[in-house]
Amino acid sequence: MAFKNPPTESVVPETPDRLFRDLTRRRLPDVLPHQAEIMRRYANEALDRPDVALQLPTGSGKTLVGLLIAEWRRRKFHERIVYLCPTKQLVNQVAAEANDKYGLSVASFVGNNKDFSPSDKSDYQQAQKIAVTTYSALFNTNPFFDSADVVLVDDAHVSENYIAKQWTVHISRTNPAHEALHRALSNLLEPHMSATDITRLRGVWDDIVDRTWVDKIPTPVLATIASELIEILDSHTVGTKLAFPWSSIRSHVLACQLYVSSNDILLRPLLPPTFSHAAFDRPRQRIFMSATLGAGGDLERLTGRQGIFRIPAPSGWDTQGVGRRFFIFPEMSLKADEIPALRADLMARAGRSVVLVPSDAAANTATVELATSPGFPIYRVEDIEESKSRFVAEANAVAVIANRYDGVDFAGNDCRLLFIDGLPKATNAQERFLMSRMGANVLYNERIQTRVIQAIGRCTRSLEDYSAVVVTGEELPDYLTDTRRRRYLHPELQAEIAFGARQSRDTAASDFVENFEMFFNNSKEWEQINNQIVDERRRTVQEQLPAVGELQASVHFEVDYQTLMWRGDYEAAVDAAERVLGALSSRDVRGYQALWHYLAGSAAHLAAFSGASVTMTSKARQHFLEAHRCAPDISWLSTFTRRQNLVESTTKSEAQTAVLTQVERLAANLTRLGTVHDREYGKLEALIMTGVRHPETFENAQKELGSLLGFVAHKVEREGSPDPWWISGSQCIVFEDYVNTTERGELSVEKARQASSHPNWMRANVAEAKGCTFLPVVVTPATSIRRAALPHVAELCYWGYSDFVTFTDTALAVIRELRRDFAEAGDLIWQARAATMLHEKGLTLDAIGQALSHHKLAARMTAI
């Protein structure tokens, strides 16, 4: 018979956990007690709430919980259910688990809408099957899934970039497709940026600190250039991948923030305005499944939602770990050139290994290196995103994955060796700006912690898993081994890291290998050692992150602010920002308070700009000034208030701002050199200390000293070029070094002419020097000058060679002292102390210039 019978109604159990017993194809006897507890709480407490978060730690079986809730709702209420995963690989993994392990039939959707199976589309639309798909299938300008009743968001703790992508225009300087657009925007922004910053934006720099530079175009400036910005983006995004996010924010540019860095330009709202996306906002319920619920409102900031109802993990999961990690920190004992050999040796013994790196460029470099040693087959993320079966089938292989904290898991025997090299804490320009330039680190503590846990847990997904984790590169080793940060981690993780750090001190490469083999083979010796970690875990307590209560209390109004800004109701947005400020009061959130005073002022400025009441102008001024008073050690706010003519711009105020910028650059240097060990800093310290004492290495050491102090310091070898120069703010010291002589040496006419001409050369050849006041300085032990040279030295200053060496030693001693207390860039307490010490010790460029201005060369040298 061709006609089909209508489906028969079946009785649906009262709670999702009971449904599992009715699935005849399941391979598990029943759900576990903790899974049942979460599902029952959901059915009893959260059934009709619009936004619900379920805490499902790694290893707790979150996929089964999510799928059972979805299937239960589908059957009970005949709802269309969409289950979102971060990646295609996870979509396939969830679909396979649903069918093979749990006896559920789901419809998986990957790729373009036009490629979706007609039968799967029909099954979803008729509420016959759950749709399992990626975030990008829902978060786009024309989603197929625009009429769901319920949306389940898997791995919600890593969802920010996937969700915010719809409202983010990201222009990469190094992407050939963005070259013309980047150049056009750089030209638009040039009048509103300093000479130094515009060169950074255009990529014309060679100071390693400049690669981490990030800035924000203030909202008052954005308002004046908005129409030109729209015209440029309209012209350059047609037919490109940028066209879709640009269409989402084009009518709301003033509700966005514009960030610039040495690598990209980023235009996006502070929080994703998910309320404006019907496919996400219209469903009856959104269910967020996360390894951590947090207590500081980060989930609300990630998703743009308010009042998310939380169901925490059952009692006991707060002390239970997931598998066993053996941490190895080779940089604590080995030199940089010894680490590749150790890596190859460990890889050869492990068979399969995974390497996490922070960027595609780093992945390309690692791929080239690993192709030689150990020479195993190399898989990139695109090779395993659909399926990792080919990688797992290899006896010896390496997977190199760029900039991923999530989405690709290697549980069980898939992989027992994980390398993490230089994963940064911030993943986009907004996060970098708020942390390093606004001192709002406290906002991201929870997010950073989650990313770190995700990174180190790629190979430990269940209780029986075990994996060695080799940590190298910038930031992450410091983060994990700093006891000031470690106390906020899970007790098990604290114990594992403490044990690994102890084993990594004063350890030879052969000992690293021996320890790894003992762990890898899971021998009886390792069982005894493992008991040490378990004992330490029992003695360890996880502390709460700072200011989480205030951050949780403020997030409701933060979402209100973004919503009102998006709707163009700027006056109401000022009120929402002031409500945020009402929730923030502790010292830990000073940087975040300053940010919200600035945001309140920005909304008031836009209200006045749009023709609102005149009181908005004074309110904008009041909030902008309060932002600066709240965090006077933030250079960005100091510069902003001066450029907005909110404070009198004097030589003294400009010098103070220059010092704050100097401190930020010093912090970037200390971050780059690391705090987990003294090796890299000690190497640079020795290079400078020894270099200034030898004529052949003096110039390079002088340049490195300036850079370490936080100045823009460079040196080029061209005809007529000066020796190194140091720039800070609008001041520039340009050197002529005549150190390969003695006190009996004479300064020749040629040297005098060269030194005197250096300011003109700088004006003609160095973009960062635009608008600078120059102080040409001769560094030499010589005490005599040719009489014929006197007409050329009226503006030259003299810095005795021995005095410069003494200055170098003093500077290095001060920096080493500051380094002892340094934890991370953006620490406002440290920044204030650093600024004070640099000023008191005469290590700011203003202080150096004032001292040298009293040492005119003509008065210090004897004419002969």
Image: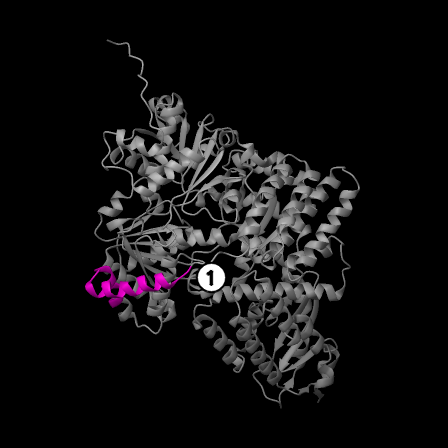
Where is residue 66, by image quadrant? Answer: top left
Seen in the image, is 713 located left or right of residue 469? right
Residue depicted at 33% across the width and 43% down the height: 34
In the picture of the structure, the residue carrying the numbered disc 1 is 485
Q: Nearer the viewer, residue 156 or 217?
A: 156
Residue 24 forms part of the magenta stretch: no
Position of 530 relative to 150 (above/below): below
Seen in the image, is 69 located left or right of residue 855? left
Q: Which residues are magenta?
A: 514-541
Residue 649 seen: yes
Q: How is the image coloured?
A: one colour
Q: Nearer the viewer, residue 758 or 404?
A: 404
List x then y, in percent, for residue 117. 34, 25
Seen in the image, is 706 located left or right of residue 507? right
Residue 61 seen: no
List x then y, in percent, for residue 588. 58, 58
Q: Nearer the viewer, residue 531 or 565?
A: 531
Where is residue 847, by image quadrant? Answer: bottom right
Q: How many marks?
A: 1
Which SS type dominates the magenta stretch?
Answer: helix
Residue 540 forms part of the magenta stretch: yes
Q: Say which element carries label 1.
A: helix
Q: Residue furthest right?
A: 614
Report the quarter where the N terminus lies: top left
Seen in the image, is 221 located left or right of residue 446? right
